[in-house]
Image (cartoon, helix red, strand yellow):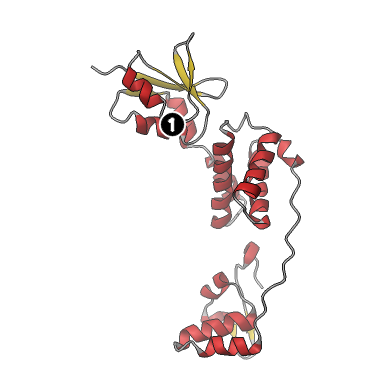
């Protein structure tokens, strides 16, 4: 008969697992990154991240495993408070997705719970994004905004406000010549596609703005286009 495996979260924020000695279980534990054995207390512990519990459950699939209900609820609701706060403030679905994405990445990188992270963890994460991942300045700023919102607005921690923003990249836009534009438009045979390209180029529209256009948004008499819900939910 299989022994029962107990999983819970300690006050220091680490996830712990214990079971009667079983060499097969020990080998499975060592498949979970960040493990540490505590010989005096006879349990294993892991850094608290959103993936740790999922990995443990996967590794011990088919075994008798008991997970602290509070831990299940906590992991299941992680960032739900962030999602709700962003939704209440009418942030776009794309922004909500980005903010949650970067906050998840940060906790996976820091291998700590939200209450344990420090200003140095944030700096190291941003350096990781910039140097190792090579993200753009705009993406780095989104990451900073995501961390500031979650830790400043939701969790009410002030340390992230010490993070300085990177200077913006100064790049000249690529401007096509009149001849190049003419060749581009003449290469399109489908009249609908050609109309879309001509409208996009002549009015300087974003792709998202073009696909949401309706017939009633175009005022042919006054030669105006009404863009509804553009960037920042602003009409123009």
The percent position of residue 102, horizontal first and vertical second, equals: 58, 46
The percent position of residue 5, horizontal first and vertical second, equals: 36, 20
Residue count near mark 1 (Cα–Cα under 10 Å), binned few <14, some 14–19, many ≥20: many
Classify mark 1: helix, strand or loop: helix
The percent position of residue 118, horizontal first and vertical second, equals: 68, 32
The outermost residue toward the top is 40
Note whether 88 is above or below 181 in the view shown: above
Frontmost residue, 106 versus 228: 106
- The residue located at (62%, 51%) in the rendering is 89
Screen quadrant of the N terminus: top left
Screen quadrant of the C terminus: bottom right
Frontmost residue, 140 versus 115: 140
The percent position of residue 169, horizontal first and vertical second, equals: 72, 61
Note whether 77 is above or below 9 in the view shown: below
87 relative to 222 in the view: left or right = left
195 relative to 171 in the view: left or right = left
Q: Which residue is mark 1?
A: 53
Quarter of the image for residue 72 reads top left
- The residue located at (62%, 29%) in the rendering is 116
Q: How many marks?
A: 1
Quarter of the image for residue 30 reads top left
Note whether 4 is above or below 119 in the view shown: above
- The residue located at (54%, 76%) in the rendering is 213
47 relative to 134 in the view: left or right = left
């Amino acid at each position: 008969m299989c022994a029962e495996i107990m999983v819970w979260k300690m006050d220091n924020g680490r996830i712990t697992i214990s079971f009667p000695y079983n060499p097969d279980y020990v080998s499975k534990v060592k498949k979970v990154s960040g493990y540490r054995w505590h010989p005096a207390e006879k349990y294993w512990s892991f850094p608290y991240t959103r993936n740790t519990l999922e990995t443990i459950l996967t590794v011990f699939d088919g075994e008798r495993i008991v997970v602290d209900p509070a831990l299940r609820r906590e992991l299941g609701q992680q960032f739900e408070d962030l999602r709700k706060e962003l939704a209440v403030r009418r942030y776009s679905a794309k922004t909500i997705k980005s903010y949650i994405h970067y906050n998840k990445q940060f906790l996976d990188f820091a291998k700590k719970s939200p209450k344990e992270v420090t200003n140095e963890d944030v700096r190291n994460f941003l350096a990781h994004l910039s140097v190792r991942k090579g993200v753009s300045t705009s993406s780095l700023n989104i990451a900073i905004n995501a961390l500031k919102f979650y830790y400043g607005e939701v969790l009410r921690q002030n340390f992230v406000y010490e993070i300085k923003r990177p200077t913006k990249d100064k790049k000249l836009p690529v401007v096509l010549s009149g001849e190049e534009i003419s060749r581009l438009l003449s290469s399109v045979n489908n009249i609908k596609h050609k109309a879309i390209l001509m409208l996009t180029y002549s009015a300087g529209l974003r792709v998202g703005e073009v696909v949401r256009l309706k017939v009633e948004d175009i005022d042919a008499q006054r030669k105006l286009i009404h863009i509804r819900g553009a960037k920042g939910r602003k009409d123009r």
